[in-house]
Image (tube, helix red, strand yellow):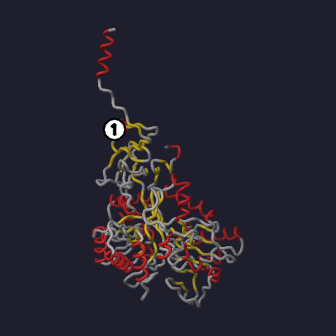
């Protein structure tokens, strides 16, 4: 007995083994790109209550326990992408999907089938065609659409939404014929005989306004699907670049620079309802608000920052000062190649631009105005500078949407001094390669979609995808390689490293919406918005970046996308 007591006392004196801490999820045996300030690489992450609680190496599996552990088997874990500027579309019941077509003949089959199902006289619409992806390597025309559906008005918006093609019946209903002058802010393309060929640049609203409206109930399921599709691309947060404060939806084609597939810009009210019902299964959203005019904006009770970590208000933005290169109608300082006297289009006067900036700023809004051409960039940056000079603001994080061309040296210096950011779309370099080669030349062509130069000047740059196409891997590839889809390489002096590109698409993009303390990197205390890739974006051959797939997506620690299903 005495021996037993002595043994018990001795055992009690020994130090107890440390108890493992409890987490909800462990991810181990991976290559963890933390994207912290040092871009540290680790191998394991612990998640609890929707947030990262520990980042480390193999020891994490010993110091933490969880009801679910995922063996990454060497795959790459990184923060979810934060896409700072994109447009999501709802698909109308009368819509086809020409974005999926690879020839005009395929578009024809889609349109013919839809016309047959809807019946004569009904509108057929669609969005997303791109002549560079079509076997014919040309725009579809009025004549093509007439063959497809002679008894139905048809309008199909090009990818980028800056132009559309319509058939004869749609043009007739819109009152567009050989005698119709070019509308303000737009262009009607014509054949050698002066007859419209069906292509309308920028002023797609002239036709789209005639398309019968869909109800919000009809459009909601498609929009929710578009939201969930972002998760398959690894986008865990995004900034929706087209939202209104209206009580009722507004047709996207209802303003110059708009366009869509009979799609409506969703309202703040609608998106609040969607996120109230389904927010935990969707990417986090920050909303651009289209400028509604001074009087209506003053009556709106909210401003930038209102909302929560699932859905909140961002800038007054995307309100376009100029057009884009899908037209092309971006406002440039020099004539377009082969188009003497044509330098693109602006959609407002400098006075109206100044009023929009000043009013929005006075009401507590961030600004994010659309500027693509070099002259447009100079003009919008100057308007920002003037308002900030008269009414200085700390940490305002105003930005220019797009910044597709290099502006003047002075503009970049002014932007850096004023703290003006930009949302860049390097994926345009890939997808719009053919259009750039067609309409630009010299240095302005070679330096298209610049990244390295504005960064070197101290301009805060973040990455996004707009809608050409939505997909961060294309953006990473183009930012690093400067290559278009056929392999044409633009100036490498504007390329950035893979680490820089990933940071600009995660941590830096999160900071544009003042979320740098919450997301964009894998650090304790931040949301567990994480993605698992099937290959390492830091080391794979450049061309494999385009083939990289997202295996898993987590938002707030919840698995919301699993490409491999039960294999995980």
Occupied quadrant, residue 145: bottom right
Q: Please, is residue 315 above or below residue 2 in the view?
A: below
- How packed mark 1 is, by other alpha carbons closer than 10 Å (few <14, some 14-19, many 20 or more), is few
Q: Position of residue 431 (x, y in %)?
A: 45, 69
Horizontal side, residue 495 vs residue 180: left or right: left
24 or 40: nearer the viewer: 24
- The reply to whether residue 402 is visible in this rendering is no
Residue lying at the far right of the rendered structure: 119
Q: Position of residue 284 (x, y in %)?
A: 47, 57
Q: Position of residue 153 (x, y in %)?
A: 65, 77
Q: Quadrant of the N terminus?
A: top left
Horizontal side, residue 550 vs residue 252: left or right: left
Occupied quadrant, residue 109: bottom right
Circle 1 residue:
59
Q: Position of residue 455 (x, y in %)?
A: 30, 67
118 or 521: nearer the viewer: 521
> Residue at 46% of width from left, 39% of height from top?
68
Q: Please, is residue 520 above or below residue 324 in the view?
A: above
> Residue at 60% of width from left, 85% of height from top?
176
């Amino acid at each position: 007995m005495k021996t037993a007591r002595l043994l018990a006392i001795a055992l009690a004196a020994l130090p107890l083994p440390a108890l493992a801490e409890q987490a909800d999820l462990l991810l181990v045996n991976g290559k963890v790109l933390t994207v912290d300030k040092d871009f540290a690489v680790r191998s394991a992450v612990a998640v609890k209550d929707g947030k990262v609680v520990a980042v480390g190496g193999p020891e994490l599996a010993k110091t933490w326990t969880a009801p679910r552990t995922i063996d990454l088997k060497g795959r790459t874990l990184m923060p979810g992408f934060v896409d700072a500027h994109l447009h999501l579309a709802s698909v109308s019941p009368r819509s086809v999907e020409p974005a999926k077509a690879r020839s005009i003949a395929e578009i024809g089959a889609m349109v013919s089938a839809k016309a047959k199902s809807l019946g004569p006289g009904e509108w057929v619409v669609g969005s997303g065609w791109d002549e560079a992806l079509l076997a014919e390597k040309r725009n579809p025309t009025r004549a093509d659409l007439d063959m497809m559906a002679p008894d139905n008005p048809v309008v199909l918006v090009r990818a980028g939404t800056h132009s559309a093609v319509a058939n004869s019946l749609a043009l007739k209903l819109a009152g567009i014929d050989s005698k119709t002058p070019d509308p303000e802010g737009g262009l009607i393309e014509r054949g050698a005989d002066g007859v419209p060929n069906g292509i309308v640049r920028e002023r797609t609203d002239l036709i789209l306004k005639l398309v019968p409206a869909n109800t919000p109930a009809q459009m909601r399921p498609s929009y929710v699907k578009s939201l969930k599709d972002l998760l398959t691309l690894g986008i865990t947060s995004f900034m929706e670049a087209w939202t209104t404060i209206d009580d009722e939806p507004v047709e996207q084609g209802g303003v110059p620079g708009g366009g869509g597939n009979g799609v409506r810009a969703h309202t703040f009210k609608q998106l609040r309802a969607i996120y109230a019902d389904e927010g935990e299964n969707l990417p986090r959203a920050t909303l651009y608000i289209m400028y509604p005019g001074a009087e209506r904006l003053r009556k709106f009770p909210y401003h930038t920052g209102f909302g929560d970590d699932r859905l909140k208000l961002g800038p007054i933005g995307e309100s376009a000062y100029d057009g884009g290169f899908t037209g092309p109608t971006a406002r440039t300082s020099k004539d377009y190649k082969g188009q003497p006297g044509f330098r693109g289009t602006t959609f407002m006067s400098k006075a109206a631009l100044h009023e929009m900036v000043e009013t929005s700023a006075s009401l507590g809004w961030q600004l994010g105005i659309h500027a693509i051409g070099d002259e447009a960039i100079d003009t919008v940056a100057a308007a920002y500078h003037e308002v900030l000079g008269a009414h200085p603001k700390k940490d305002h994080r105003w930005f220019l949407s797009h910044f597709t061309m290099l502006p003047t040296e002075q503009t970049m210096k002014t932007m850096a001094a004023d703290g003006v950011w930009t949302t860049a779309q390097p994926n345009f370099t890939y997808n719009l390669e053919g259009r750039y080669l067609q309409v630009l030349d010299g240095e302005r062509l070679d330096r298209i979609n610049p990244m390295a130069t504005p960064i070197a000047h101290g301009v805060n740059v973040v990455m996004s995808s707009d809608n050409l196409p939505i997909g961060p891997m294309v953006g990473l590839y183009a930012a690093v390689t400067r290559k278009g889809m056929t392999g044409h390489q633009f100036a490498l002096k504007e390329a950035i490293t893979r680490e820089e590109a990933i940071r600009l698409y995660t941590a830096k993009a999160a900071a544009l919406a003042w979320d740098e303390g919450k997301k964009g990197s894998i650090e304790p205390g931040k949301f567990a918005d994480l993605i698992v890739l099937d290959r390492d974006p830091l080391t794979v051959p450049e061309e494999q970046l385009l083939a990289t797939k997202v295996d898993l997506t987590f938002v707030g620690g919840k698995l919301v996308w699993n490409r491999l299903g039960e294999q995980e």
